[in-house]
Amino acid sequence: MTIYYLDTNIFLYAADPYSPYHTACKGVLVEIAKDALGAFTSVETIQEIESSGKVIPTLCVILSEAK
């Protein structure tokens, strides 16, 4: 399985329903949650996501719906 690096933008776009990349990025996260895609990120990315505000709660909802 190929493992992909997830940049901050994947998370930000997935959490923003107005982004033109929302559907694609949300789909990537759903595939990761279903173990259909391998991925990793960095501490710096997590810090950037956390500093952006409401992104983490939105991502939790996206990932809980994937199960």
Image: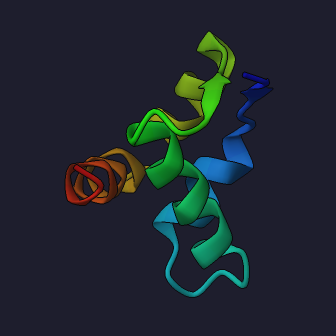
Q: Which residue is at 26% across, 47% downward?
A: 60
Task: Specify whether residue 4 is in view.
Answer: yes
Above/below status of 27 relative to 67: below
Q: Nearer the viewer, residue 35 or 26?
A: 35
Counting from the top left corner in percent of width and height, residue 9 is at 72, 51
* Residue beneath the point at 60% across and 12% down: 43
> Would residue 46 appear left or right of 42 to someone viewing this image?
left
Q: Which of 32 and 13 is in front in this view?
A: 32
Q: In this view, does 50 lie to the left or right of 61?
A: right
Residue 13 left/right relative to 52: right
From this view, report whether residue 43 is shown above or below residue 45: above
Q: Which of the 4 image quadrants contains residue 1?
A: top right
What residue is at 65 percent from the left and 21 percent from the top? 41
Q: Can residue 52 be seen by looking at this rendering?
A: no
> How far across and down, in percent of the image, does residue 29 sit?
51, 49
At 67% from the left and 51% from the top, the residue drawn is 10
Query: Coloured how?
Result: rainbow
